[in-house]
Image: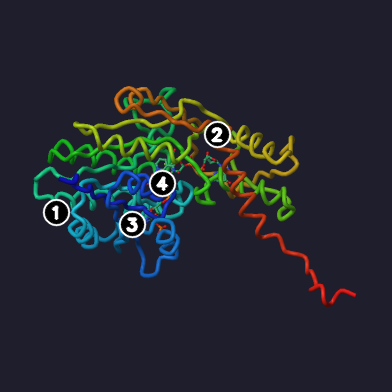
Amino acid sequence: MAPVQKRALITGITGQDGLYLAELLVGKGYQVFGLIRGQNNPKREMVEQLLPAVELLEGDLGDMTSLVEAVNYCQPDEVYNLAAISFVAFSFKQPEHTGNITGLGALRLLDAIRIVDEGKGRIRYYQASTSELFGKVRETPQTELTPFHPRSPYGVAKAYAHHMTVNYRESYNLHASCGILFNHESPRRGHEFVTRKITSAVARIKLGLQDSLSLGNLDSKRDWGFAGDYVRGMWAMLQQDEPDDYVLATGETHSIGEFLDLAFAAVGIEDWKPYVKQDQRFMRPAEVDLLHGDPTKAKKVLGWEPEVSFPQLVEMMVENDLQIESTRIPRQFVPPTSLVR
Ligand code: NAP
Ligand code: G4F
């Protein structure tokens, strides 16, 4: 008898992690469903082209009915909640909206699962928790046991979602796990995040399309890994007999300055200082100064390890942006040969 095809629902399918996770699950033979929001989402076409096997379902983390309908329609074995207002700086501008989507949105999805599953314990749940929970860090490196001290409306909303996931696991015997993921980047990273902002600008500066780059705080440090590695860890969490929470991180930390060093060096510019300006507009009301994760538990229990190094990640992102930006260079007019005398 042919093995039964597993079914997965991914929220946040149009985001960086959603695309990598969908590719991973399709490759493993899953039937994948993706939740897409809005009446005419401009990213629908991109997802359809990249992942023709994925079925897109309309729904929004702010709308309970649409979540119940989506979960009921696809009857998933696994639900990955990757959708969120995920940009920390934006969360200071719209804290209530962030709380509603990033925080309460997780509760709505957990309840949709509870309603559809009717206590059968068939649906497994992954919650996208974050190293932003550690915020003003109490110890370094940070582990699953490090206390939380979030520093932004985003971090606070994610703390609510994290605790609610643990609470549903304990209250309703739900197979629900939280991945406490440290920063992970890729050529698919949104341009609002510092790594992509840098690699895109570096490519444009190299090609003569831009003179300089304006940034905020250059002193903060992050534990940056490759998104493609991190989605393997998400999947591994849901394959365990028991649900639990895991840190996924590289175990290394680097400053924004170090990222700039490597990104500019990748295009042959040794000193980036003449090109980088500091701008108050990109400073945050409260900052997370240092993130440095300890992935020992994930390595031991899940057998998870990142494969892409920090220099490889930076190079991959710069290379991708050079390719994208080089298509924007205005072509010189070349007259047809018949007109050349
Ligand atoms: P991302 O690229 O910003 O993607 C966010 C996704 O959420 C998008 O698909 C977006 O859809 C969707 N979304 C936003 N509001 C929604 C709503 N009201 N209803 C339904 N969908 C909505 O984020 P990511 O980097 O892939 O991260 C995935 C998850 O992991 C997020 O929850 C993030 O907070 C968390 N996380 C990320 C990192 C990291 O370093 N990347 C680290 C730790 C945790 P649209 O395209 O339509 O806007
Ligand atoms: O790239 P960022 O915006 O990422 P941040 O705030 O660390 O959040 C990301 O990682 C979290 C995991 O720890 C996720 F949960 C979250 O969803 C998101 O994916 O900023 C990184 C650092 C910050 O210290 C910021 O102040 O870079 C600093 N920075 C300096 N100048 C800047 C800029 N960040 C941005 N986005 N833009 C700047 O111009």
- As shown in the figure, which amino acid type bears the numbered disc 4? Tyr
* Residue marked by disc 4: 20
Q: Secondary structure at mark 2?
A: loop
Label for residue 54? 3
Mark with earlier residue (1, 2): 1
Query: Can you tell me whether the CB of the residue at mark 2 lies under 8 Å from the nearest atom of ligand 2?
Result: yes
Q: Residue at x 72, y 48 (%)?
A: 206
Q: Secondary structure at mark 1?
A: helix
Using the numbered discs, state the Cα–Cα distance from disc 4 to disc 1 in whole angstroms: 27 Å
* Residue marked by disc 2: 220
Mark with earlier residue (2, 4): 4
Give the left or right position of residue 135, taking residue 76 as reference.
Answer: right
Q: Residue at x 74, y 39 (%)?
A: 269
Q: Position of residue 9 (x, y in %)?
A: 27, 52
Q: Quadrant of the C terminus?
A: bottom right
Residue 214 versus residue 20: which sits nearer the camera? 20
Using the numbered discs, state the Cα–Cα distance from disc 1 to disc 2 in whole angstroms: 43 Å
* Residue marked by disc 1: 116
Using the numbered discs, state the Cα–Cα distance from disc 1 to disc 3 in whole angstroms: 21 Å
Mark with earlier residue (4, 1): 4
* Mark 3 touches mark 4? (CB < 8 Å): no
| Farthest front residue in view | 1
Question: Comparing marks 3 and 2, which lies closer to the viewer?
Answer: 3
